Image (spheres, rainbow, N blue to C red):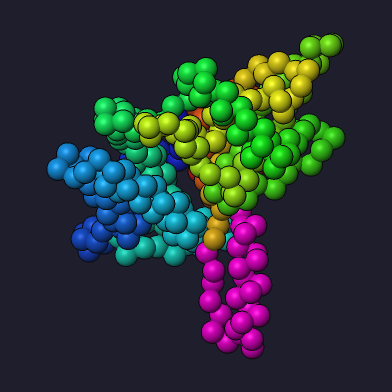
Amino acid sequence: MIDQTVSAESGTDKSADLPREQARYFNRELSWLAFNQRVMEEAQNAAQPLLERLRFLSISGRNLDEFSMVRVAGLVGQFRGNVDERSADGLNATQQLEAIAIASNQLVEEQQRVWTDLQQQLRLVGLSVLDADALGKKAQSWLASYFRDQVFPVLTPQALDPAHPFPFIANTGLCLVFDLQRRSDAKLIRELVMIPSGLPRFIRMPGDEAVYVAIESAITWHSSQLFPGYDVLESGLFRVIRDSDIEVEEEAEDLVRYFRSAIKQRRRGDVIRLEMDSNISETVRDLLRKNLLSDGAAE
């Protein structure tokens, strides 16, 4: 489960302090989140087929990612640039970011609840998403072969310590962080494993029933192959959402060259949102915050 702690300072209703003419307007960003909430309602609609409900849940998650990459990123840019421009409903960038952070986190928590409920219902009709440790011996043996042949060759653990620069994390990229202890001398180390985007998000297990294992569960289960001679003390998953907004300059001399450059820069945009497993230790959380988050970003 992803833990999404808000970086907002308060959740008070700002509309009560607005002039009457501004209070007549809905905030554009909060209105969009309300629309995505309606998408979520379709994922909870028992009249819809189960896989259709799962599709609506996926759409709501993708929508929220794009919302953070573009709409929230624009507000973060105003916040960092000390731009005092207000929306039609009278809120400045800081107030909008606070309200968005609260509404977004509530939406994500509901997505997690719906996902848990759908998993239970899908299991009743023969479709399961299991952790690697919940598989039978035969299935675990097949998964070990799959990991050795298809996953292990493309993984590159990277040390997280003062002697190594913090690696670049791609937009929406999944990463696992491991705290390890060497058996020979009890030395503690911390390693980062980026999950390549080319790997399947869920691994289909062989057999008549539709059983899937999440890629991060498969990697964690086989961590002894990644770190021979070490014991895993704890591990956790995280990902980042980066600024992917492109500002169009109509007066650019060469639009093709301008957009080619803008698209390249977009891949390395500032982190707008950081999502972490709830079981990640506070020490690791502080490390990720320090190296990934900037002012105005949410966690």
**Residue 46 visible (yes or no):** yes
Q: Nearer the viewer, residue 248 or 212?
A: 212
Measured as percent of width and height from the top left, residue 81 is found at: 57, 61
**Residue 78 visible (yes or no):** no
Q: Nearer the viewer, residue 100 or 175?
A: 175
Looking at the rendering, which quadrant does residue 130 occupy?
A: top left
In this rendering, would 275 be left or right of 232?
left
- Residue ID at (29%, 43%): 51
Q: Identify the image quadrant of the N terminus.
A: top left
Measured as percent of width and height from the top left, residue 19 is found at: 26, 58
- Residue ID at (50%, 37%): 203
Relative height, residue 253 to residue 1 (above, below): below
Instruction: Please provide the residue range marked out in magenta.
Output: 245-271
- Residue 299 in the magenta stretch? The answer is no
Measured as percent of width and height from the top left, residue 289 is found at: 62, 37
Q: Which residue is most to the left?
A: 47
- Residue ID at (79%, 42%): 165
- Residue ID at (82%, 38%): 164
